[in-house]
Amino acid sequence: MKRVHILILLFVAMLSGVIFVALGNSDAYASFQQAQDDPERVFHVAGTLDLDKPMDYNPVANANLFSFHMTDRQGLSRKVVLHKPRPQDFDRSEQIVVIGKMQGSTFQAKDILTKCPSKYNDAPTQTVAN
């Protein structure tokens, strides 16, 4: 084999390895149960805010500690602890995605994504008069 062919084969092998490792470590959407079954892995858990349970945020004591309860898409409710400030308009969120790991029965979120109601959904339609 020529050197060029060997270099191309090595490059393809390295590229395949990089892709394999990247796909193996990628975050996955899951339920709280799946996250609890694999506590070493980072998961994205989508759900809704459980308004029947209290939210705990005291910015004077610790501005980077916010906890709340969330119900995932399978109906399982868990306490979520976020080590960041409470997102603005959090209690108005239609959907929440928490990113992190389970620790016991508590989900330790490293980040949170919220989907708030659109201000355009309830806007009255306007007609233009000529």
Image: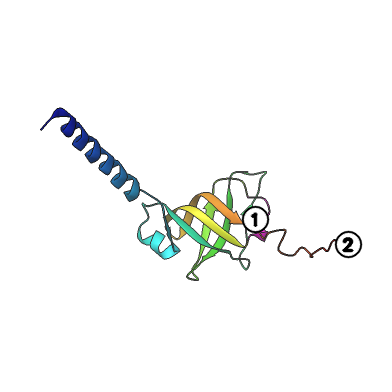
Query: How busy is the neighbourhood of tag 1: few (under 14 within 10 Å), some, or many (20 plus)?
Result: some
Element type at mark 2: loop
Q: Amino acid at mark 1?
A: Phe
In this rendering, the answer to whether 51 lies above or below 17 is below
According to the image, label 2 marks what residue? Answer: 129
Q: Which mark is residue 127?
A: none
- What span is colored magenta in the figure? 87-93
Q: In which quadrant will I find the N terminus?
A: top left
Q: Per the image, is 20 magenta? A: no
Where does the image place residue 26, in percent across and percent down from the top left? Answer: 38, 49
Q: At 52% from the left edge and 60% from the top edge, which residue is drawn?
A: 79
Q: Residue furthest front?
A: 130
Q: In which quadrant will I find the C terminus?
A: bottom right
Q: At 17% from the left edge and 34% from the top edge, which residue is drawn?
A: 5
Query: How busy is the neighbourhood of tag 2: few (under 14 within 10 Å), some, or many (20 plus)?
Result: few
Where does the image place residue 60, in percent across and percent down from the top left? Answer: 67, 43
Q: Per the image, is 90 magenta? A: yes
Element type at mark 1: helix
Which is more toward the observer, 7 or 109? 7
Q: Amino acid at mark 2?
A: Ala
Where does the image place residue 3, in percent across and percent down from the top left? Answer: 15, 28
**Numbered-mark total:** 2
Q: Residue furthest bottom?
A: 75
Tell me whether circle 2 and circle 1 mark residues in contact (CB < 8 Å): no
Left or right, 22 with respect to 72, comes to left
Q: Which mark is residue 90?
A: 1
Q: At 24% from the left edge and 39% from the top edge, which residue is drawn?
A: 12
Say which label, 2 or 1, has the lower sequence index.
1
